[in-house]
Structures are given as structure tokens and as C-alpha cells.
């Protein structure tokens, strides 16, 4: 285990910065219109994918600010997040209760539901904070491809430890101990050596280890 | 927590003979006190009954004939019964409360000791909050039942029977008149009971919903705020809160209606008595004293009925609570001691795994819907181990066999989820393997008593748990045989002595909140001292290179680790490069199997899985070590 805290971000269209007044507005909570407006244009998937005890459709439509979930948007979002296949297998489809008191979603299902929840808002800025860690690599690949296809003018920030998650980004920012130590595309960073290239080598090794199952002696 | 809320919504029957029998068993040791309490209760009821009778005697036998002396005697008697009644009630109350408290004390103790015997797996599936509720709230609810429920019900019933008997005996016709309101009273009481049962249930359900909603929305606060749900959620909470208010208001309404209605029926009965009885008195068919006694008895007749209607809810809640408590007490002890354990006075320290297959038991609480499509990972049950879906693919260890000689130190290395922690969980018998055997000194550990086995095992976990107390008490951990001197020596042996001496009260420094004032490195050193002071023959170490430990402490820990391993059978789940370089042998776990073994050099030379692991986990450390050393040298040079 390394003690280095690393995250790698991807900024495809433009770099997004929090504006200065933000911190002042936080104190006002509900009374701060700018904060609500700011958050309205952000769709975010956090590491800890928290689902509420409500039907799946309500969870996906959580950020839509409408009294009733719009079934079309819910379905679209679920398709994009590769959750629709799973939903087809649920006893009550989109009406299935999830969260603490409903069915237990697997880690991967939870993450994909959280992605659906974030993209259902059709946000200007999409932030994926370690959001694909429980999804297998091939599904991850597909989800990322779909997200790229619909990103259009959307800004996407991906935070991940996994090279496979960020390698297609327009720009990769490498953070180490709170500082930006490298930035560039996957190819330029690999060529440059350093933290990113090290991480890449390590993950190749990890993949090899995972695959080492077949020829391992018993 | 979720099932906890759901459980609380369920209200059982008000009376369940099976539960009641089991509850009464707890009263058995207090048979004499309970009997005394019931006798006193009967006495108190008798005193209650005697009052009106004395009034009757006073009026009919003395006042009517103007016998002043007799009146004085009867007044004294009346006062006497009131005093006796009060004294008796005081004693009865006192005894009942004491018995109730004693029973609750024992019940809490029983739940606690039972919980301590349960396998670690149980706690993975049962949140702490729910178990806390069992020991505190549910036991308290039972207390209410024991004190104000069961015993007092006897008194009420007796008083009721006594009043009826006295009335019939005095004058059965007047009694009939008084009882003419009973059908209405029965109807009213059963209406109230049904309503209060309903509203009580509604209140419980709604408070449970509020709790669940609060719990969820506080936990998911970041999502709430990020998705701008504050307004919508405030509206939803308003609904829930209003529901709760409505339920309470309805309960208030039925209570508010019930008491005056009972009072009104009482007044009707009195009016009927005065109308009919008054006529009888005028016609000299009934004496005035009897009529007045009747009016007083009528009042005493309504009180226990009111009481009984109220106690219904207490009984109901208590039955639900006792059911939940008993469910915890009935939880089977899955890791059990053998009936005739093999003695284990001394351990040589030979450990052997023979074809061990192990999977973590499923921890899903009962009554949940099944998970989504199979094949996806479920929530992890154990610490640091991979999730285990039911079925054949859940094996964490797949036919692991190895033998460790007495005094040998062995490191287990492997990628995340390779099954390293499970090895420790099996040797300490936190879990039992599904197949195969774990042997200590050639005997299956299931044949030893857990106490005996664990006495010889020292365990140093990566997350050290410090109890509130002092540094010394945390090292001694309740073992009085360990002297202060031994504690000091243990601390010196593991490099903890120096920093402990620098603490404000040295070894007597108090440890608060799990050792929050100590650094993680210092906590780890205390854990080593704790393990070593008990001088175990077998040492299990989860050795995590903690990132927050400074270089100096890190070196102290490494040195301490080497000291404690020397000459002692040790199994180390190694995360430090220095550790794996210093052990006698390394076993490489991969996907639940042992795939390679040897020394660090031998394994590196093989170029197999170990080499990959080494590159993945330890090469960084090596690089950092060299960097640190050159850094240290640089600082040294400067200071010189």
C-alpha cells in the first residue's frame, strides 16, 4: 500500500473552477439562490452512492425538482447508465423499492443508479468521483463511451484511481498530496514518466495478477 | 437500522401466554417478594373496601341512634384502615419496584453475556444501534410492565371483585341498579381500548417513519444538498410530522372523551342509586347507611376499570419488547465450546491448516427481499474481505494447507481479498471453517475451550481498540496477574516505554475516546505491549504500514515487531517490506490458495506471483526508505 493519495481528473471542454462567492454563500443555506443555481447545473456521482428508501424511479429523478418522476427521462438515464438491463430483472421494474428498506442493490448497480440520477438532470457539469470502482471494466468502458457520446458541450470531471477510467480524457490532471504534479493527455503523460506512468505500470501488474488465476499452481 | 424501524412498527398481542410464562420465570427467584407484594395488594384492596362499610356502620348503628361513643370508635376504625391502607400501599409499591429493578438488572446482564458469547459473524449482520435498543429501551418497557402492569392488575381485579361482592352482599337490588350502567361501561371501555390500540399503533408507526426518514436524510445530506432537494424534503418531512401530530391528536381526543364519559356513567349510576335507593330509604326498605356505602362503592368500582383499560397499552408494548429481547437471547451460539474440552495448559505453538475451505456466512438480516440479479457483488460481511454471495463461489479459502513449527515466524502476503485476514479469523475461532481442520499442537481447535485457546494467542490488529482507562490498564487488559513491573518491561521491549514516560501521568495517563489523544503509531506500540505482556505462545499480527506514522515512530514499530516475533510462533499479515524480509518463511496467498512459499530472496528469484506482489506493494516502500534515509543523512549533516 502506498501512502500517497492520488486522484486524476479529466477536463474535456473547459476547466471548471468554483467561483469565489461560493464559500460566502454556503452559510446562507436555503437562502442562497446562487448556490442552488450552481448546484442545479452540476450532476454529481459520489464515491458513496447513497440511495433513498423510495422507488427506483424516484431515486433516478431525485434531482429533477418535479413532483412526479418523468418516466421517459428516468428510462433514458437508466439506459445511458447501463442500469436498464438490471431493472428489467427487478420484480417491479422502476417501481422497485431501493435504499435501506428495499432490495439490496449490488455495489455496481448502486453506482450505475447514481450515475443515472446524475445524468437525469442533464447537467452542464458532470462530476464522477470514483464513481465506477464497483463496475467491471467492460461495463465501465461502455458507460464511458455512452457518456462521451452525449457529453456534447457538457463538462465532465472524472476523479478516479483507475487509469482505464480516465485514459480517454481530453486532459488529465495528476494530483499528489494536494498539489497538481502533472497534466496532459494519456499519451503525453505516459511518455513523460513520473507518477502517472508509475500508476499505469502498477495497474498493468494488478491486471496480470488478476489474470494469474489460470496458470497458478494449486 | 432499517429492520429496527420495521420491527418497532410491529405490535404484538397484548397477552401472549408463551411469552408471559417465560417472563414469569424471571420472577421465580423473587417468589417471596412477589407473594408478599400480592398479599399487601390484597390488604390494600381490603382496606379500600372496608371504608364504605364503616361509613354504613357509623350511620346505621350509631348516628341514627345518636351513640356518640360508637361514632368515635367507628371514626377511629375508619381512620385506622386508611392509615393501614396507605402503609400497605407504600410497602407494596416499594417491594414491586425493587423486584422490577432486580429483574431488569438480571435481564440486561443476561442479554449482555449472551451477546458476548455470540460469534463475530452475528455482529456483522446486526447494527450496534439495534442491539443497544434491546438492552436499554426494551428492558425499560418490560420494567414498566412488571411494576405498573402485572402486579397492579392483580390489585385492580381483586378490588373489582371485592366491590361487586360487597355490593351484592349489602343489597342485591341496589347492586342491580348500580350495575345497570355496566353494559354501557363495557361498550365504552372496549371502544376506548380499540381506539387507543389503534392510535398507539399509529403513533408508533409514524414515529418510526420519522426516525427512518431522519436517519436516511441525515446520512445522505450531501446528496440532498447537491440535488437541491431541501425544499422538497422539508415538504415531505412536514407531511410525516403532520401525520404524527394527527395521530397524537386523535389519541388525545379518545383519552379526553373516555375519562369524562366514564365519569358521566358513574354519575348516572349514582343518580339511579339516589333515585331508586332514596325511594327505598324513604320506604325503610334500605337503610341510609347502605345507600351511602353504595354510592361510595360505585366510585371505587369505576377506578379499576379505568386503570385496566389504560394498562392494556403497556402490556402490549411490553409483549413486543419481550419478544425482541427473547429473540436476541435465543440467537444460537454458532461458535460453541465442546462439552468436554481438551485441556490446554501450555502451548508449544505448532499451527496447522489441513485442507481448509472457508466462506463467510451470509449476513443478510431475515425478512429482506432477495438481492438483484445474481453474479453481482453484495455488501461485504467481514472486515477487509471480499463480498461473499451464497453458493459455491463464496469461498475465501480454497483448500489451504500449511504447517508452522513452534517458534517459527511466517508472513502471509497476497493481493486484496486473497484470504489473509480469514486465516487469522480462523485461528482465533471468530469463525469455523466449513471444511478441513485448524490444529494447534496437533489438536483440532474446535476441541479446545475458546477461553483456553485465546489465552495463548496474542492478536495485534491494524486498528487498535483502546478502552477508556489508563495506559497501564490498556496494556494489562484486566489481567491482574500482570504486575506493574511486567507492564513496564513489556513496554520497554516494544519501544513504547519512552513515549509513555513522556505522557503527563506516565503509565497512569488516562486514555479517552479510544485513545484519541495518542497518535496512531503510539496506539500501535501500546497494542504490541498489550500482546507481549500477556506473553502468548502464538502471536498473530496484522501489520499495516500506517501512512500517518512519522519515520521515527515507524522505525520504532519495525524494531518492536522484530523483537516480538523472535522465538515465538507468529503469523503476520505483512504490509511492511521490513517485516517480510525478517520472517522465517513467506506464504503467498492468491485467490484463496497458497501458491508459493519460501524466503523473500527465494520467492523473488522465482519470478512468480510474489514478484508481482512485491513490485506492486513493496517496491514503493523500498524506494521511500532509501529516499528517507538519504533525507535523514542530509538533516544529520546539517545538524552537525
Image (cartoon, helix red, strand yellow):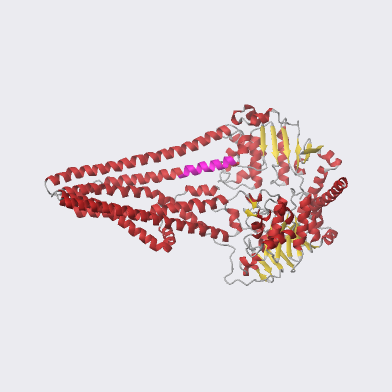
Q: Position of residue A85 (x, y in %)?
A: 64, 44
In the current view of this chain or complex, which residue is farthest to the left? Answer: B283
Residue B389 higher or lower than B263, as above or below: below
Residue at 58 percent across and 57 percent down: it is: B122
Q: Can residue B261 be seen by looking at this rendering?
A: yes
Q: Residue B301 versus residue B231: which sits nearer the camera?
A: B301
Residue under the image location 87 percent in, 45 percent down: B638
Magenta stretch: residue B216 in it? Answer: yes
Q: Left or right: where does residue B405 sit relative to residue A60? A: right
Q: Which residues are magenta?
A: B204-218
Residue B452: image location, x then y, percent: 63, 67
Q: Residue drawn at (29%, 47%), measured in percent from left and top?
A: B302
- Residue B439, by quadrant, is bottom right
Q: Is residue B40 left or right of residue A133?
A: left
Residue B398 visible, this orientation: no
Residue B629 on the magenta span: no
Q: Position of residue A190 (x, y in %)?
A: 84, 42
The kind of secondary structure the magenta stretch mainly shows is helix
Along the line of sight, which residue is nearer the eye, B418 or B55?
B55
Residue B448 spot, x, y in % from top left? 62, 69
Residue shown at 58%/72% (left/top)?
B340
Quadrant in the rendering for residue B165? bottom left
Amino acid at each position: 500500500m502506498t501512502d500517497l493519495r492520488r486522484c486524476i481528473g479529466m477536463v474535456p471542454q473547459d476547466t471548471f473552477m468554483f467561483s469565489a462567492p461560493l464559500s460566502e454563500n454556503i452559510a446562507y443555506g436555503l437562502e442562497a439562490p446562487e448556490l442552488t443555481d450552481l448546484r442545479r447545473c452540476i450532476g454529481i456521482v459520489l464515491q458513496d452512492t447513497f440511495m433513498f428508501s423510495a422507488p427506483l424511479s424516484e431515486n433516478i429523478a431525485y434531482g429533477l425538482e418535479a413532483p412526479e418522476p418523468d418516466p421517459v427521462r428516468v428510462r433514458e438515464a437508466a439506459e445511458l447508465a447501463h442500469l436498464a438491463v438490471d431493472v428489467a430483472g427487478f420484480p417491479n421494474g422502476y417501481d422497485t423499492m431501493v435504499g435501506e428498506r428495499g432490495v439490496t442493490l449490488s455495489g455496481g448497480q448502486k453506482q450505475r443508479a447514481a450515475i443515472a440520477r446524475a445524468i437525469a438532470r442533464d447537467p452542464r457539469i458532470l462530476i464522477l468521483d470514483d464513481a465506477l470502482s464497483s463496475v467491471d471494466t467492460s461495463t465501465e468502458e461502455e458507460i464511458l463511451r455512452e457518456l462521451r457520446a452525449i457529453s456534447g458541450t457538457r463538462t465532465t470531471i472524472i476523479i478516479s484511481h483507475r487509469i482505464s477510467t480516465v485514459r480517454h480524457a481530453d486532459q488529465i490532471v495528476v494530483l499528489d498530496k494536494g498539489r497538481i504534479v502533472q497534466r496532459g493527455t494519456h499519451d503525453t503523460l505516459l511518455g513523460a514518466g513520473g507518477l502517472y506512468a508509475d500508476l499505469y505500470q502498477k495497474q498493468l501488474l494488478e491486471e496480470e495478477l488478476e489474470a494469474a488465476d489460470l496458470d497458478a499452481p494449486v | 437500522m432499517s429492520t429496527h424501524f420495521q420491527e418497532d412498527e410491529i405490535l404484538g398481542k397484548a397477552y401472549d401466554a408463551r411469552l408471559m410464562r417465560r417472563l414469569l420465570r424471571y420472577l421465580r427467584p423473587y417468589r417471596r417478594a412477589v407473594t408478599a407484594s400480592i398479599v399487601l395488594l390484597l390488604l390494600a384492596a381490603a382496606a379500600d373496601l372496608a371504608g364504605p362499610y364503616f361509613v354504613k356502620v357509623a350511620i346505621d348503628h350509631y348516628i341514627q341512634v345518636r351513640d356518640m361513643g360508637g361514632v368515635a370508635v367507628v371514626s377511629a376504625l375508619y381512620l385506622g384502615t386508611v392509615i393501614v391502607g396507605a402503609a400497605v400501599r407504600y410497602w407494596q409499591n416499594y417491594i414491586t419496584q425493587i423486584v422490577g429493578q432486580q429483574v431488569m438488572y438480571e435481564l440486561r446482564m443476561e442479554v449482555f453475556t449472551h451477546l458476548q458469547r455470540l460469534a463475530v459473524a452475528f455482529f456483522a449482520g446486526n447494527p450496534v444501534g439495534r442491539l443497544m435498543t434491546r438492552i436499554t429501551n426494551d428492558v425499560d418497557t418490560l420494567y414498566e410492565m412488571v411494576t405498573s402492569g402485572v402486579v397492579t392488575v392483580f390489585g385492580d381485579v381483586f378490588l373489582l371483585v371485592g366491590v361487586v361482592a360487597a355490593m351484592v352482599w349489602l343489597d342485591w337490588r341496589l347492586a342491580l341498579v348500580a350495575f345497570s350502567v355496566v353494559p354501557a361501561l363495557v361498550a365504552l371501555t372496549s371502544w376506548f381500548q380499540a381506539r387507543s390500540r389503534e392510535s398507539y399503533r399509529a403513533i408508533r408507526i409514524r414515529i418510526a417513519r420519522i426516525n427512518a426518514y431522519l436517519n436516511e436524510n441525515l446520512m445522505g445530506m450531501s446528496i440532498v444538498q447537491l440535488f437541491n432537494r431541501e425544499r422538497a424534503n422539508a415538504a415531505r418531512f412536514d407531511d410525516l410530522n403532520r401525520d404524527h401530530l394527527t395521530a397524537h391528536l386523535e389519541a388525545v381526543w379518545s383519552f379526553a372523551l373516555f375519562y369524562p364519559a366514564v365519569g358521566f356513567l358513574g354519575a348516572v349510576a349514582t343518580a339511579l342509586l339516589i333515585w331508586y335507593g332514596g325511594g327505598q330509604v324513604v320506604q325503610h326498605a334500605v337503610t341510609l347507611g347502605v345507600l351511602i356505602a353504595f354510592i361510595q362503592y360505585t366510585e371505587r368500582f369505576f377506578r379499576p376499570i379505568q386503570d385496566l383499560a389504560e394498562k392494556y397499552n403497556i402490556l402490549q408494548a411490553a409483549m413486543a419488547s419481550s419478544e425482541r429481547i427473547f429473540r436476541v437471547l435465543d440467537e444460537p451460539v454458532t461458535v460453541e465450546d465442546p462439552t468436554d474440552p481438551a485441556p490446554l495448559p501450555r502451548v508449544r505453538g505448532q499451527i496447522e491448516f489441513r485442507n481448509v475451505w472457508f466462506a463467510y456466512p451470509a449476513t443478510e438480516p431475515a425478512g429482506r427481499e432477495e438481492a438483484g440479479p445474481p453474479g453481482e457483488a453484495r455488501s461485504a460481511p467481514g472486515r477487509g474481505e471480499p463480498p461473499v454471495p451464497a453458493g459455491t463461489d463464496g469461498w475465501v479459502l480454497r483448500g489451504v494447507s500449511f504447517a508452522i513449527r513452534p517458534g517459527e515466524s511466517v508472513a502471509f502476503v497476497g493481493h486484496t481479498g486473497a484470504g489473509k485476514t480469514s486465516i487469522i479469523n480462523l485461528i482465533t475461532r471468530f469463525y469455523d471453517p466449513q471444511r478441513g481442520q485448524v490444529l494447534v499442537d496437533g489438536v483440532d481447535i474446535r476441541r479446545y475451550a475458546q477461553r483456553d485457546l485465546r489465552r495463548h494467542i496474542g492478536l495485534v490488529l491494524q486498528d487498535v481498540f483502546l478502552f477508556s482507562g489508563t495506559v497501564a490498564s490498556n496494556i494489562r487488559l484486566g489481567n491482574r496477574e500482570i504486575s506493574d513491573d511486567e507492564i513496564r518491561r513489556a513496554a520497554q521491549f516494544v519501544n513504547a516505554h519512552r513515549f509513555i514516560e513522556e505522557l503527563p501521568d506516565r503509565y497512569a495517563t488516562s486514555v479517552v475516546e479510544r485513545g484519541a489523544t495518542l497518535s496512531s503509531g503510539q496506539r500501535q506500540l501500546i497494542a504490541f505491549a498489550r500482546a507481549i505482556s500477556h506473553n502468548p505462545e502464538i502471536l498473530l499480527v496484522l501489520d499495516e504500514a500506517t501512512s500517518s506514522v512519522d519515520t521515527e515512530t515507524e522505525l520504532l514499530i519495525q524494531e518492536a515487531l522484530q523483537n516480538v516475533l523472535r522465538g515465538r510462533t507468529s503469523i503476520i499479515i505483512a504490509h511492511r517490506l521490513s517485516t517480510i524480509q525478517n520472517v522465517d518463511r513467506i506464504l503467498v496467498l492468491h485467490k484463496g490458495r497458497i501458491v508459493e512459499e519460501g524466503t523473500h530472496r527465494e520467492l523473488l528469484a522465482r519470478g512468480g506471483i510474489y514478484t508481482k506482489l512485491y513490485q506492486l506493494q513493496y517496491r514503493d516502500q523500498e524506494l521511500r526508505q532509501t529516499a528517507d534515509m538519504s533525507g535523514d543523512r542530509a538533516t544529520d549533516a546539517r545538524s552537525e
